[in-house]
Amino acid sequence: MEASVIEFHLDGRSGVAPYMQLIHQVRHALRLGLLHEGDQLPKVKDVAASLAINPNTVLKAYRELEYEGLVAARPGIGTFVTGTLDGGSLAAHGPLRRELQRWLAKARRAGLDDESIEALFASTFRSASEDVEDTGRWAG
Amino acid sequence: MTAVIETEGLGKRYHKLWALTDCSLSIPAGHVVGLVGPNGAGKTTLMNLATGMLAPTAGRIEVLGERPAAGPGQLAQVGYLAQDAPVYAGLSVADHLRLGAHLNPGWDSELGRRRIGQLDLDPGQKAGKLSGGQRAQLALTIALGKRPELLILDEPVASLDPLARREFLQNLMEIVGERQVSVVLSSHLISDLERVCDYMIVLVDSRVRLAGTVDELLATHHLLSGPRRDPASLPDGVQVISASHTDVQSTLLVRTSGPVLDPAWTASEVGLEDLMLAYMKQASGRGQHHRHLEVQK
């Protein structure tokens, strides 16, 4: 068995369906530049055997990723990465991360605990996304 | 695709006690089917009917299109692993493989040898000296050696420690990935079934309460929470599976084919384990909670 670029894991208590967890892990790896175009995803049979999950679950995840245009199946050979999610922005990650770290430190000094920070981030993220959509509509 | 198991009004009575009642199922091929329910719900009875070890008292059952144990051809297509993975204590691992080859016309001796090697079993070892996990793996090897189209496993991991359990399920999933075999397995461990099964059957008090593909079951059940109100006020087509109330709030598990549009309710997805438990509770919650005696074949 050839070593694969990524290895899947499952969190049984997350409440997230196993096939969604696999999809998230591939997207995550693409976003962080761990997976590149041409890389092969682990074989369905091997994922099923190593995680003790139904092969149909793995197939479902791969099909969904294929539908999104991120991977392509070559019959009899395997499933390969065909798309990227980093949007060419990997270089920007470093500076953004440092800014975020500064912001986090500021939030902690202001007395926010982890949950409050997450809630604040999520709600700001949501309202910002809505603003972008509105602006988009006006601009269009 | 044809059904691997099809039953209609199937029932089995032991003296005065019905172990299985009015069971109508059609299990499509190509699935790993989980059979869940409390002790005495009828799981083993259903499996024994499917393998032809028992004859029905009422109704009919067909397995792979024929009456169970109708003839050698039908028997050769069904692999069965009974509870506690019975093996012959006095025979060695190699003896078991020889016996399997001798008794089954389509025996896959290559698979037998390969699995014994993979599992690191000593062919000379007496089966009575094997650990629980090794015994289960040996019994699975024998069941697989006949190249069945359908594999029926009664509580295959119940007596195994967590590590042996995981290894057994890893092996099983590898096999399902390799060959076109349908599997029906019973277990109390819903978290295990959640990983490996894509079709679920809930049996309670000798009746089928729920059956369907996991995708379909998850898509048609929702958890609703909102201000307290009478569940009877819900629109037609919404079936309440379980309900709990505080003074001000109601939480309902409902089954519905369409989306829940009433803005008073916050709808969220429900996990498979919670879903199974709700159906088991719904059935046993009525009247006095009691369990039938576990009926052995």
Image: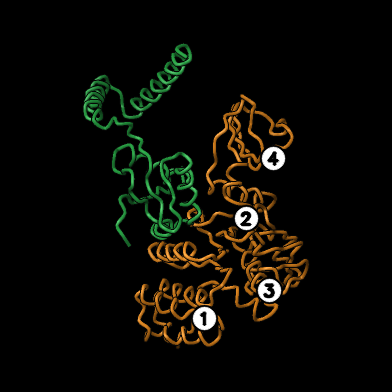
Chain colours: A green, B orange
Q: What's the CA distance linking mark 4 and mark 3?
A: 36 Å
The residue at the point 33 percent across, 48 percent down is A39
Disc 3 to disc 2: CB gap under 8 Å: no
Q: What's the CA distance linking mark 3 and mark 1?
A: 20 Å
| Disc 2 crowd, CA 10 A, few/some/many (<14, 14-19, 20+) | many
The residue at the point 25 percent across, 22 percent down is A103
**Circle 2 sits on which residue?**
B202
Of the two numbered discs 3 and 2 on the same chain, state the one appearing first in sequence: 3
Give SS at disc 2.
strand
- A35 is higher (above) or lower (below) than B100: above
Give SS at disc 1.
loop
Q: Residue B90: horizontal and vertical position, in percent?
A: 45, 88
Residue B239 - label = 4
**Circle 3 sits on which residue?**
B68
Of the two numbered discs 4 and 1 on the same chain, state the one appearing first in sequence: 1
What is the chain letter for disc 2?
Answer: B
* Marks 4/1 same chain: yes
**Circle 1 sits on which residue?**
B107
**Is A51 placed left or right of B53 in the picture?**
left
